Image (cartoon, rainbow, N blue to C red):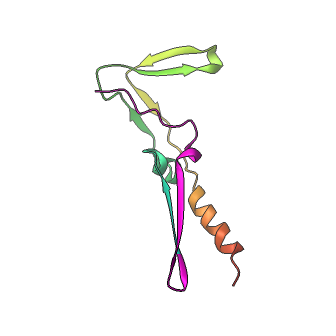
Amino acid sequence: MGRARPWPKHMRDCIFSRVDSVGDGLVGWVIVETPYAAAVHEGSRPHEIRPRGNYPLRFVMPKAGGAVIRTYKVNHPGYIGNPFLLRALEHVISASPG
């Protein structure tokens, strides 16, 4: 098993958009190229996180003086979600003339 893909630090660096003219209107796409975008947008239930291979998960804890924590299981508390794409769409619709 290879190393984890080095995703950018900020999800905003993985958001791409495109708008095309179609007939008398416009069609737009927004693509978020991260495997965790849906969990950020929609939220997630509490769940267990385990490594995929026979090696521990590794975390650096800045608030604990940079301590490195290694473990084979983490209980994620869940996340309520941040519907940033929906809010952006609502903003564009409310700002559109007509």
Instruction: Provide the residue span drawn in magenta.
Output: 1-26
Q: Report the residue at 53% width, 64% height from top.
A: 18
Give the percent coordinates (x, y) of residue 91: 67, 67
Quadrant into which the C terminus falls: bottom right
Q: Report the residue at 50% width, 54% height from top.
A: 42
**Magenta span contains residue 88:** no
Q: Is residue 93 above or below residue 77?
A: below
Quadrant into which the N terminus falls: top left
Nearest the viewer among 42 and 4 is: 4
Nearest the viewer among 27 and 74 is: 27
Instruction: Name the image quarter holding residue 35.
Output: top left
> Horizontal placement of 85 versus 2: left or right?
right
Nearest the viewer among 82 and 4 is: 4
Q: Is residue 74 above or below residue 33?
A: above
Give the percent coordinates (x, y) of residue 45: 45, 45
Q: Report the residue at 29% width, 25% height from top.
A: 53
Give the percent coordinates (x, y) of residue 16: 53, 55
Q: Is residue 91 above or below residue 39?
A: below
Q: Report the residue at 37% width, 19% height from top.
A: 56
Nearest the viewer among 80 and 25 is: 25
> Horizontal placement of 47 versus 87: left or right?
left
In this figure, what is the number of numbered marks? 0
**Magenta span contains residue 25:** yes
